[in-house]
Amino acid sequence: MKSEQQKENSGRRTFIKNSLMVSAGFMGLRYFTGTSALAANSTSLYNKYGPLLKDPKGIFDLPKGFSYKIISRSGELMDDGFLSPGRNDAMAAFPGKEGRVIVVRNHEISSDDLENGPFGVDNAKLQQLSEADIYDRGYGKNPSLGGTTTFVFNEDTQEIEYQYLSLAGTIRNCAGGLTPWGSWLSCEETFDSKLEGVNEQNHGYVFEVPVSDVALLAEPFPLKEMGRFNHEAVAIDPDSGLVYLTEDRGDGLIYRFIPNEPGNLRAGGKLQALGIKGQKGFDTRNWESQTIKTGKQLEVEWIYLEDTDPEEDDLRLRGFAQGAARFARGEGMWYGNDEVYFACTNGGKEKQGQVFRYIPSADEKKGDQAGGGLLELFSEPNDKEILRACDNLTVAPWGDLVLCEDDKHPRLIGITSKGEVYHLGLNVGYESELAGACFSPSGKTLFVNIQHAGLTLAIKGPWV
């Protein structure tokens, strides 16, 4: 049993390692945000790496000089005896020992999707878990099959050396986010409730997963005060400790969580919803008319919410009635350069996606609960040839924004520091969304999932 001092020291070491990992991306984003080029709707593609070339294997088209390798497939036997789950979704990469990369990976699996679960089609491997290791055992007959896996990757050999189940018993773990102290927050995109003989627990929560290069199951502790709703992604401001969250609903909200103890989410806190100052119930979706213009910044106020662990799926409705703004399916979210970026999958006139940025105020950066910043519609191309259904997003160490599309044959979209949009990859092999794009700490490898196929790819190339 580790002493409290040992735990604290270990946490500090992890924080330092993670800070080194993300710092390059933050520096790159300084150049990315220093231009207003992206504020203008793009009308043509930038030829950064050249055209996408046809993949002879018929799986993933990439530009000249780039290559991919399938490094993980669902159904593989992992080192802890469980099966690698399917429905791979959001991921994050952390530095490991001796130059290895540790990747934590979500799995957006429903309880009835036995073919993609970690326990086998008959759930026989469920018996390998103690009751304390799984959030919802489903009375031993209907366990919740979502969660996370963790793998250790060798960039020199481009091989996974070790992989294991790291969170068990949750449902539809879609996105999440890095913490400044070096862990992964995994979010349930569901509102499934307790049901006799089916679910032993309510769902719709955020769970924290430690980063480890040896098998370590996270304690399945739901962070209930961060809200119960259709969670998607999370971003944390390392200065203030404030947590920002997206909601995957066509009439969803953007949330802010004020922790009682920054860095200790289990200590609880207060949940708020984003509103536009002086414009109650503002609609950012631009579906019927252009209520928010690209590049325009609006003052934000934060609205306190009550009953944030509700029995009815009405948190967003009550928040809107209190004056919160509506967003069109909030998806990926990422923090950098003192700002928060997030994607809305079907926002805009053509419902092809929007990218927003939120700029916290100076008072907010200091943890002022009353502080509100600025919201800007950063990009809304309204052109399927440019962008379709943006979902997960990340920022490369050199500053380019990389977006995953949620479409039948989706692309990886890149945006340069000058706002030029280019296509980085195309999934031609499967009718499946892309998910989980993230770079290794070295910046040499881009990891991405072909979700429905249960594949994780490692992409190498002449990154610049």
Image (spheres, rainbow, N blue to C red):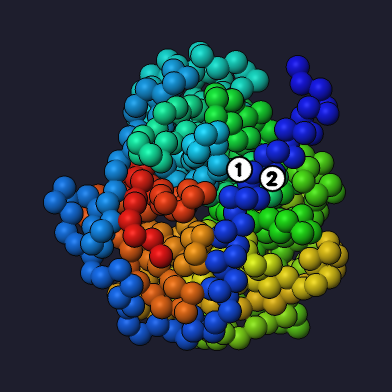
Circle 1: element type: strand
Q: Residue at x 34, y 51 (%)?
A: 460
Residue 443 on image: x %, y %: 46, 53
Q: What amino acid type should be assigned to the residue bearing mark 2?
A: Ile
Q: Which residue is mark 2?
A: 16
Location of residue 200 with respect to 229 vertically, above or below: above
Q: Residue at x 72, y 80 (%)?
A: 299
Residue 306 on image: x %, y %: 79, 55
Q: Which residue is mark 1?
A: 184
Q: What amino acid type should be assigned to the residue bearing mark 1?
A: Trp
In this rendering, which labeled residue sits more in front, label 2 or label 1? 2
Residue 46 on image: x %, y %: 33, 77
Q: Residue at x 29, y 43 (%)?
A: 69
How crowded is the residue under tag 1: few (<14 C-alpha within 10 Å), some, or many (20+)?
Answer: many
Location of residue 164 with respect to 53 vertically, above or below: above
Residue 433 on image: x %, y %: 35, 54
Q: Residue at x 42, y 51 (%)?
A: 444
